[in-house]
Image (spheres, rainbow, N blue to C red):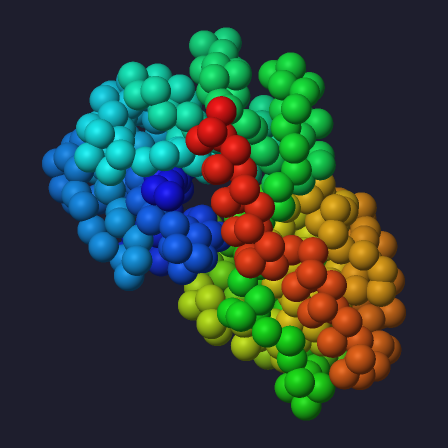
Amino acid sequence: MKILLIASWYRSERAPNRGSFIREQARALASSGVKVGVVVFDRDSKKSLLSVTREVDDELIEFRISVPSPLHRLIGFYFPCLLAKKLDTIIGEFAPDVIHAHAARPGAVVMSLSQSNIPYVVTEHSGPLTDFWMTVHGKNAIKRAYNRAAKVFSVGKTLSLDIERYFGYVNAAVLPNGVAVDMFPKADINEKSDYILVACSLIEGKRVSDIIKAYFDSKIERPLVVLGAGPEMGRLKEQVNSAEGGLGRVLFKGAVDRNVVSEYMRGAHAFVLASEHETFSLVCAEAIASGTFVISSRCGGPEDFVKVPFGGFFDVGKTTELVELIKKIDKFKYDQDFIDKANQYITEQYSMESLVNKLKEIYIQVNKN
C-alpha cells in the first residue's frame, strides 16, 4: 500500500522539531511495510517559489514545495489553488492508494482542490478552529475540505465538537496522536530527580508566566526547568529575575532535541502544562509514558487522557489552583509500581503501534470504497 501524507507543517533544518508527531507517524507507517510519501509546504525553503524538491528521509520520500515564509500563509490561505496544481503533479508521480491530510489548513484545503480522484482522509490537529479563517470564503474552504474527504478525524473530543459546531460535520471520530513509547520509555525509579518540568514553545498562549508565578508562590524548593524557545523568552526571564529569590531557581534550557526532552521527562518530579487551548497535547501523554505525574490546565485535549492517579487539573489562568497542585505533588513519593502503571496505560491506549494498526485499517477501508 502507498500512502501520501500532506503535512500542514513539518520539520526543516531550521525547525527540526516542527511537526515531529507527523514525521513519527510517517516513520512508523513505513516501518510497518507501508510505502510513505510526505508533501511538505516548506516555509523555510530558500529555493524558488513553488519549486518542488524530492528528498529521502530514511524510508520516507519527501516532496518539498517551496513556499518561503510569509508566503506560505498567504498562498495557503488565499491562493491554495497554486499549491493544488503542484500537489497534482506529485500525486501523479507517487501514485498513492490513499492520501492523508494532517489538518484542514492548508493541507486538506489544498487537497480538496485537487483534480485527482484518489480518496483522502483528514486528521484535524489545529485549534481553536476559529483562528483558522478570517473570511466567509476561508470558512467555506475548510468546510469543503471536510465534506469532500472520505473520512474526517480529530485528535480530541473537544475538537470533534468544534468541527460539528462550526462546520456542521457530525461524524468526526476521535483518533488521538500516537505516542512513540520507544522514544519515551518509562523511567527507572533511580532516574527520578527533584525538578518540576515545563516543555513547550514559549508563546503567550502557553501561559508559562502562570507556571512561573505559581511556582514561586508555592515556595517549594525544587527547581523549575523550562525546555523550549520562543518570543516570550525575554519576558519570562525578566519575570524570574524580578522574583524574590528567583535567580538560579528557574533554568531555561532553550530548544532541545526530542531525545533530550525524553531524558528530562524521565527525571522530572512533575510535568506542568498551563495552555489556553490544546487539541491533544502529545507532550502530556509522553510525560505519563515516562512515568511522570502531569499537572494540566483544562484546555481541551488533555482531559481525554490525563486520568487519576497519573495527573490533575486546574482551570486556565487560575494560578491559585495551580499553586495547590504544585504543593500537593511536591510531597508525592514515587515508586516503580506507579511508573510501570503509567507507562502501561499509555502503551495500551495511545501507543504509536496501536495508531498505525488503526490507520492501516482505515486506509484499506477507504481504498476499497
Where is the N terminus found, in terms of image quarters? top left
Q: Is residue 325 left or right of residue 21?
A: right
- Quadrant housing residue 179: bottom right
Residue 351 lies, in percent from the top left, at 61, 59
Q: Is residue 322 left or right of residue 263?
A: right
Is residue 252 at least partly visible in the picture? no
Tell me where residue 31 appears, x and y as whole percent.
40, 60
Residue at the far top in the pictured view: 136
Q: Position of residue 364 (x, y in %)?
A: 48, 37
Q: Residue at x 32, y 36 (%)?
A: 96
Looking at the image, can residue 157 be seen?
yes
Where is 146 relative to 225, above or below?
above
Residue 143 on image: x %, y %? 52, 16
* Residue furthest left as drawn: 48
Depth check, front residue: 229 or 311: 311
Q: Residue at x 54, y 77 (%)?
A: 263
Relative depth, front residue between 281 and 31: 31
Q: Across the whole image, how many numbered discs are drawn on residues? A: 0
Eyeballing the image, is 282 above or below 134? below
Q: Is residue 261 left or right of residue 329?
A: left
298 sits left or right of 86 in the view:
right
Residue at 18% across / 46% down in the picture?
54
Q: Quadrant of residue 238?
A: bottom right
Q: Check the image and report above or below for 49 versus 11.
A: above
